[in-house]
Image: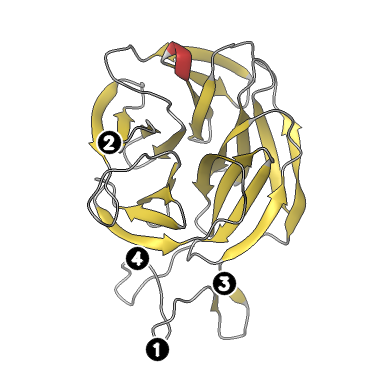
Amino acid sequence: MGIYDHNGDSLNSAYSKSGGGLSAAYAFDGTQIFPSSAGVFLDTAIVTALPSITHTGIKQGACTDGVYIYQFSRNTASVIIYNIAEGTYTTKGLGWSVPYSHGNDMAYNPNNEHIFLAAMTEDGAVMELDHALNYVKTHYLQDLNGDSFSVWALCFDQNTRHFLADYGTLVLVYDEQFELIGSIPSARTVTGTAQGMETDGDYIYRVWSNPNKIEVASITGPYVTTITNPMTGEPEAMMYDWINDRYFMSKNSASDAFYQVQLKQQ
């Protein structure tokens, strides 16, 4: 859910009278309404493998539109298009004329059905692809000082229509044209290999490997918990299906590449 003023406009954040950021909101009867939760976060995420694939490319960032999972294959400059319901997949070559580089994370914007690929290059490049995975343009993200930085983790909040990019102890907030509009304090608690990130509108999830962990923070910034991910091998990205309220993870694997993950008690 989001927080809105009396005109119905979405607010980027909420503050107390003293100026402190609010980490929760409550209804008149005392029921917590933000952040919302289906229950208590599990100490260990429950992982169910989806039907396997046989693509042997070096898999990196991923995203979902609720029907398909899209995962970038770095050494083939292609995208795996995985049908969640059927467990089948095709691939779409992107061509080598655009420097997709590492392609460490992907984000999906349902407002234009476009997919965004974080190149993880020092110039801040994020490639925009249409829903048919044709190249549209490259955006060059800047930090709070107006400098370029390597974008390695990227997601889209469908409540606020904002892109979120990891920036160390901050999450940078961008509008749909990638103009920087703010930041969220989000201290890291895990030491390991940083992978992708995702949001469900209430929480921000960072994926780590070595060790395999999922770091959870409130959308307003405060650290919540760290979940031990039982997945073997190298996890790459977290994905949230906004339509069906499902969580998925991708893995750099030649076969069992996609998993449905239960993060909270039902």
**Disc 2 marks which amino acid?**
Asp
Mark 3 closeness class: few <14, some 14–19, many ≥20 residues within 10 Å: few
Going 42% across and 62% down the picture, which residue do you hit?
184
Write down the quadrant of residue 145 in the picture.
Answer: bottom left
Residue 149 as seen in the image, left or right of residue 206: left
Q: Which residue is mark 3?
A: 33
Dot 2 or dot 1, earlier in sequence:
1
Q: CA distance from mark 3 to mark 1?
A: 20 Å
The local secondary structure at tag 4 comes to loop
Q: Residue at x 54, y 74 (%)?
A: 24
> Crowding at label 4, few (<14), some or many (≥20) Cα neighbours within 10 Å?
some
Question: Which percent across, then down, holds residue 210?
Answer: 67, 37
**Which disc is residue 10 wearing?**
4
Q: Nearer the viewer, residue 118 or 28?
A: 118
Disc 4 to disc 1, how far (Cα)? Answer: 19 Å
Q: Secondary structure at mark 1?
A: loop
What residue type is disc 3 on?
Ile
**Which quadrant would the C terminus be assigned to in this image?**
bottom right
Q: Considering depth in this image, is 219 or 103 the residue closer to the camera?
A: 103
- Where disc 3 sits, the SS reads strand
> How far is the residue under mark 4 from the one under mark 2?
31 Å
Tag 1: amino acid:
Lys
Q: Name the residue beneath numbered marker 1.
A: 17
The residue tagged 2 is: 123
